[in-house]
Image (cartoon, helix red, strand yellow):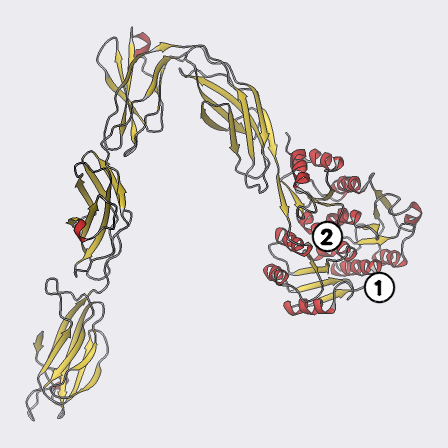
Amino acid sequence: MTMQPMAGPYGPSVASAVPALAISMFPGVNSETGWYTTAPEVTATTDSTGEVRWWWEGGSVTTVAVTAGIPRFLADAPEGTSVLNVYAVDGLGVPSALVTETLKVDSVPPSIPASLTAMAHPHRVELSWDPAIDTGSGVAAYNVYRNTTGLPLGPADLVATIPTTRYSDVTPAGATYLYYAVQAVDVAGSWGILTAALPVVPDNVPPTAPGDLQAWLNASGWCRVSWTSSVDVGSGLAGYRVRRALDGGPMSQIATAGPATSHYADLDPAIQTAVSVEYEVIAVDRVGLHSPTAGPVPMGVDTTPPGAPTGVTALPVYSDAPANARFDLAWTPGMDAGSGRHLTWIGHGDTPGVPDHEVELVGGSVLRVSADTPTALWHFQIRQSDRAGNISPWTEPVSARSVATRRVHGSTRIGTALAISAASFAEAGTVVVASAASFPDALAASGLAGAVNGPVILVGPGPIPAETRAEIARLGAVDAFVVGGTRAVSAETAASLDGLLSGRTVRLPGADRYATAALVADEISFLGGGRTPARVYVTSGHGFADALSAGPAAFVGRDPVLFANRGSVPTVTIEAIARLGATRTVVLGGTGAVTPNAEKVLPGVVRVFGADRYATSVEFARWAVANVGLTPRAPVVASGRSFPDGLAAAPLAGTSGSVVLLAREPAPTSTAQWLREGRAVMSQMTVVGGELALPDTVRRALWASVSVP
């Protein structure tokens, strides 16, 4: 404690004696370091009743009343180094001398040292770790603990206290396992928490000798020295030392090789003129222990390359969840009558005959390789070397393709539509909503979805369920179109939808499916500023298959899908076409869907059809590629036997500028053939719906049709 005379505004007093002031701390200071390891309580005691005024250096003054002779609690000392200033004033206003006290508080122990590592050498262990952190008094030392039992380390296991972050420990005689832990100690004397126990196996065993050492002079005039790898059960291999003797002279080291290497190329021209050349190889572990010597072996001569591998095959590997294309390669190794086969190189690349990547394989005649993309066309070539380093020619390129074929589905038809939405759009300001119970309204919605660039969401009766609400929120939608009357989408459902959105909800109700499709066509035209559609698509109003196929073209072109009966076209459809000013009509399906007599009332008719719904979807895909600008790049496949999964598929295909094809079990030949024809530009194929709609046998068969060169 330091007593200082008062100065300045307090002034000397002549009315009474100067009050006496004492400051005390509890608990007491750490006498060895001057640091408190717990924050002390600061108490002031005076011999006069009055008040005490105190402050921490740089802080504001606090005034408290005191009674003569009775200690008065002021505060707990803060962490770190602080200067306390205190003086007392008696009842007559006479101040005491100013008392100052420097307090050093470090009640927080140091952190746990990180990254404790050990290297076991013969008869010693080298430990190292990262410095601990102490924001108070600072780290003063580290305690090192060791035992041989693996039981929790404690005070009895302390072997050293050191100021650095490295320690060399002498290995106890006969120890087979050691366990170490380290603890930081700060200047204030607080001990931190021990690190986790680190097990260490003392390394007193050298690595095994390299095996099958051979040395061969090859056709290029250099010697390839090769061996089989050594094994080290302790600290691990550090590498190999290669030694050589010329013409009976002494062995001398000529090279070192890494631990993962099992050969060395001796390029010294002297080996070509020497009468005799011998080699030795020694393995060395990480603590410097040497293996027995392999060799010496004489250098042989082999100038004939091995035969090239034959029977090379490359097959893509099917995957349920394609993240990377994979290929299985197989071949018959080429023969070598000299030094023997050694390495095989598998080269692959995007261009036939130009392998820009190589995989090195020791032995074996099969290999699975993975591309770095889900879809890949790779061209494979293989060559082989012998023990001498002679290399065969590359085989002719063998090509293999794998096209990513994913499945997008939910547990229900509504869930599948939501999954399709998530796969199609990162965001959408407007959603198109239709009934999940019947197909006509959703089929008519494809062009409208294209006009607003949004998904088709399917709903059931009642309030909008949580999963649908979540998808609408993810999209950030503010507006919605409801396709169909209240029998299709109930008023309760529409009201629930309206409550989710900050914009408007517009219902497009018709007296029947034909009238609803006509209203949708009018809305598409309105959204386009009265635009005349490039064409209208007319399909049977009694089946879903043909309209599913038309969906992506309608989405991309923002063109309407309208319905007809088999033998006639309803007046509401004819009037809608007239209002739109359309001059071209694409009729999907054969005469069993819409008769020639019915199509006579339609303008500029082009009919697209096949032998069945699957062939029709293929023929329409061909037509759409030629006339609408769609491509086979990312086709979508939906069931041709049930409608729900395909209803929302048009935006998924449309956003990729591709097509929707129909399939069933077994996979239709026409669908597989079209996919095969378009494989060169295909980046992905998507099957919509679960296993019940399209079994995985169909998905696999369609994948096989595109995964060919």
Give x and y (percent) for residue 676.
Answer: 69, 34
Quadrant of the rendering where the C terminus is positioned: top right
Q: Is residue 97 visible?
A: no
Mark 1 or mark 2, earlier in chain:
1
Q: Quadrant of residue 421?
A: bottom right
Is residue 301 rendered to the left or right of residue 699?
left
Q: Amino acid at mark 1?
A: Ala
Q: Is residue 625 visible?
A: yes
Q: Residue at x 33, y 29 (%)?
A: 259
* Most foreground residue, 664 or 329: 664
* Residue placed furthest toward the top: 275
* 303 in relation to 691, above or below: above
Is residue 673 rendered to the left or right of residue 286?
right
Give x and y (percent) for residue 305.
Answer: 46, 13
* 59 in relation to 480, above or below: below
Q: Residue at x 41, y 17 (%)?
A: 389
Is residue 365 rendered to the left or right of residue 128?
right
Give x and y (percent) for residue 403.
Answer: 62, 37
Q: Amino acid at mark 2?
A: Pro
Q: Which residue is mark 2?
A: 644
Residue 511's mark?
Answer: 1
Give x and y (percent) for residue 214.
Answer: 35, 15
C-alpha distance separating marks 1 and 2 = 22 Å
Quadrant of the rendering where the N terminus is positioned: bottom left
* 342 in relation to 581, above or below: above
Q: Secondary structure at mark 2?
A: helix
